[in-house]
């Protein structure tokens, strides 16, 4: 789909856009179900990168301290709790620029093997990986690897200077070549234009096969980061982005990710109608607040929707 077509789609009258998104959604997915995912920050803070949105960059004073890699038993306890709470996917994040071939990586591989035993989908987001590292993650049984493009290529330099767009693409290629599912999306609300957002979407849509999973994050402005004073994302812009993503990537799991704590229930409901079919549950994302497990179950109940069961 070219940029003009994407823009025409994105700017349709909202009822028409939502109708089209629901139509595509129903052809490929159960429109009343959302996957519950749990995030765990296995290595918080102290990251050398300068991603302007990120509270875990060592360059900004955000009150997040650099910690060591979490012990395996903590991960196992969190996975057990996630499973009991109805999550079918468990995502471990580390504030690293890239994976290194050291003892910490061996320990992450042990974590992947341990979480896998709970019959959960296992995802990791650890920064850049080489082909060999991706292969080792695949051998350990990882389901998916998250590595976001974050924004359109032509806006990227406004957000991150310590690595290039093509570095991201190289990691994604290694993940795909290792036979791991690709989880790749971005953030809206960083001062970018609609064109920049759609530029990112066009990049995702050009991947063959499409990423199995696309997180759409609304920027959570964190005090101390260069983006601390950004205006909140307009809720209807979030809905339009989700709907356009759903129509463009019909079978992909579209994840309504960061920013839900700042969103009304009605906005979240519109995002589900627009085709979002996954959320992160639990009171914390990596470092920022997220709706509680109880709040999410109450919302799904109110909407007559259900959590997805394990496949
Ligand atoms: N260090 C790894 C990396 O950058 O790939 C993994 C962790 S990183 C925190 C994962 C993703 O979270 C980022 O690519 C970004 O899209 C998202 N993210 C981080 N901070 C955010 C914020 N304040 N608001 C919304 N999304 C954010
Ligand atoms: C993604 O795209 N969103 C999640 C997940 N991938 C790892 C992380 C959102 C983090 C939001 C900021 C924070 O809590 O630190
Ligand atoms: Fe944050 Fe990841 Fe960027 Fe590090 S690489 S600053 S953890 S988004």
Image (cartoon, helix red, strand yellow):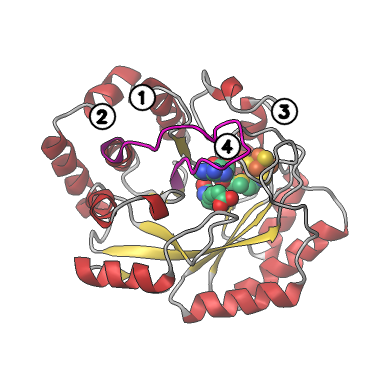
Whether residue 235 appears in magenta in the rendering, the answer is: yes
Real-space CA distance between mark 4 and mark 3, rounded to the nearest whole angstrom: 13 Å
Label located before the other in sequence (2 or 1): 2
Numbered badge on residue 113: none
Residue 226 horizontal side relative to residue 98, left or right? left
Q: Residues within 10 Å of mark 2 (few under 14, many from 20)?
A: many
Give x and y (percent) for residue 284. 53, 61
Residue where numbered disc 2 is placed = 10
Using the image, determine if residue 27 lies above or below residue 193.
Answer: below
> How many callouts does the rendering have?
4
Whether residue 31 appears in magenta in the rendering, the answer is: no
Residue under the point 82% across and 62% down:
106
Instruction: Name the magenta segment's main secondary structure.
Output: loop
| 257 vs 66, nearest the viewer | 66
Q: Nearer the viewer, mark 3 or mark 2?
A: 3
Real-space CA distance between mark 1 and mark 4, rounded to the nearest whole angstrom: 18 Å
Residue where numbered disc 1 is placed = 194
Q: Nearer the viewer, mark 4 or mark 3?
A: 4
Real-space CA distance between mark 2 and mark 1, rounded to the nearest whole angstrom: 9 Å
Using the image, determine if residue 68 lies above or below residue 311.
Answer: above
On whether ligand 1 comes within 8 Å of the CB at mark 1, the answer is: no
| Circle 1 SS class | helix
Give x and y (percent) for residue 249. 35, 41
Label located before the other in sequence (3 or 2): 2
Residue 167 horizontal side relative to residue 300, left or right? right
On whether ligand 3 comes within 8 Å of the CB at mark 3, the answer is: no
Numbered badge on residue 162: 3
Q: Which range of residues does the magenta coloring cover?
A: 214-237
Are the two marked residues, 1 and 3, in contact with CB atoms closer than 8 angstroms? no
**Residue lying at the far right of the rendered structure:** 102
């Amino acid at each position: 789909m070219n940029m003009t077509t994407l823009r025409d789609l994105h700017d349709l009258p909202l009822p028409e856009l939502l109708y089209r998104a629901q139509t595509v959604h129903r052809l490929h997915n159960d429109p009343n179900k959302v996957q519950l995912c749990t995030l765990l920050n296995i290595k918080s803070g102290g990251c050398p990168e300068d991603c302007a949105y990120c509270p875990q960059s060592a360059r900004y004073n955000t009150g997040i301290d650099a910690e060591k890699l979490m012990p395996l038993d903590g991960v196992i306890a969190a996975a057990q709790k996630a499973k009991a709470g109805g999550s079918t996917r468990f995502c471990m994040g580390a504030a690293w620029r890239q994976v290194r071939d050291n003892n910490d990586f061996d320990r992450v591989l042990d974590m992947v093997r341990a979480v896998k035993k709970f019959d959960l989908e296992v995802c990791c987001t650890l920064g850049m990986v080489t082909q060999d590292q991706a292969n080792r993650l695949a051998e350990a049984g990882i389901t998916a690897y998250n590595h976001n493009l974050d924004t359109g290529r032509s806006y990227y330099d406004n957000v991150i200077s310590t690595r290039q767009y093509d570095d991201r693409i190289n990691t994604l290629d290694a993940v795909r070549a290792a036979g791991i599912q690709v989880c790749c999306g971005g953030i809206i609300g960083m001062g970018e234009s609609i064109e920049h957002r759609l530029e990112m979407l066009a990049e995702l849509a050009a991947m063959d096969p499409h990423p199995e999973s696309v997180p759409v994050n609304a920027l959570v402005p964190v005090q101390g980061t260069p983006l601390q004073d950004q205006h909140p994302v307009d809720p209807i812009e979030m809905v339009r982005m989700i709907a356009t993503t759903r129509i463009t990537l019909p079978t992909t799991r579209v994840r309504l990710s960061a920013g839900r704590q700042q969103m009304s229930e009605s906005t979240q409901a519109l995002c589900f109608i627009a085709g979002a079919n996954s959320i992160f549950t639990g009171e914390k994302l990596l470092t920022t607040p997220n709706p509680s497990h109880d709040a999410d179950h109450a919302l799904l109940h109110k909407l007559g929707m259900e959590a997805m069961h394990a496949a």
